[in-house]
Amino acid sequence: MKMAVTVWDNRISPVADSARHLLVAQIHNQKIQGLRYDYFDQESLFYRARKLADLDIKILVCGAISYFYSTLIEGYGIRVIPFIRGEVNEVLEAYLDQSLSSPRFVMTGCVPEPNKRR
């Protein structure tokens, strides 16, 4: 399974709609099997959502995201986990050990959705 996180300066980028860089993690049996960086070379949210689908991303972890962009991404069958903050490596590890809903990873002023695996 491939998961992507939006990246800015080795942290989750604060706004997914304007993020230029992605870290793509290949995950198997709850372990990271490989990491690689990719980037968005266009501003269009339609292009960005399509690129995530073309990369075969199943989950996108990001900071704030507009409803419009989130809906575009989800239209490709990609699960969006929004309003996350922190160092990229710590966020990946928190996803793997199912502790991403910890207050330390939730953006200030945002409430995680109940009953969803973070």
Image (cartoon, rainbow, N blue to C red):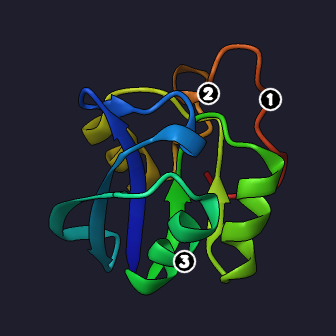
State the image quarter where residue 24 is shown: bottom left
Residue at horizontal 54%, vertical 77%?
50
Is 92 left or right of 71, judged from the image as shown? left
Specify the label residue 50 is tagged with.
3
Residue at horizontal 43%, vertical 57%?
42
Dot placed on the residue nearer the N-terminal end, 3 or 1 = 3
Nearer to us: label 3 or label 1: 3
Residue beneath disc 2 = 106
Q: How far apart are marks 2 and 1 (CA)?
A: 7 Å
**Nearest to the observer: residue 56 or residue 108:** 56
Note whether residue 114 is visible.
Answer: yes
Residue at horizontal 65%, vertical 34%?
64
Q: Is mark 2 on a helix, strand or loop?
A: loop
Q: How far apart are marks 3 and 2 (CA)?
A: 26 Å
The correct choice, above or below, for 79 with respect to 97 in the image is below
Q: Is mark 3 on a helix, strand or loop?
A: helix
Quarter of the rendering occupied by the N terminus: bottom left
Specify the label residue 101 is tagged with.
none
Q: Distance between the residues labelled 3 and 1?
A: 28 Å
Q: What element carries label 1?
A: loop
Residue 90 location (% of width, % of height): 31, 36
Please, what is the three-letter code of the amino acid marked with disc 1?
A: Val
Residue 102 location (% of width, % of height): 58, 30
Residue beneath disc 1 = 111
The correct choice, above or below, for 92 with respect to 27 in the image is above
Dot placed on the residue nearer the N-terminal end, 3 or 2 = 3
Please, what is the three-letter code of the amino acid marked with disc 3?
A: Arg
Please, what is the three-letter code of the amino acid marked with disc 2?
A: Val
Note whether residue 116 is visible.
Answer: no
**Nearest to the observer: residue 43 or residue 93:** 43
The correct choice, above or below, for 25 with respect to 118 in the image is below
State the image quarter where residue 13 is shown: top left
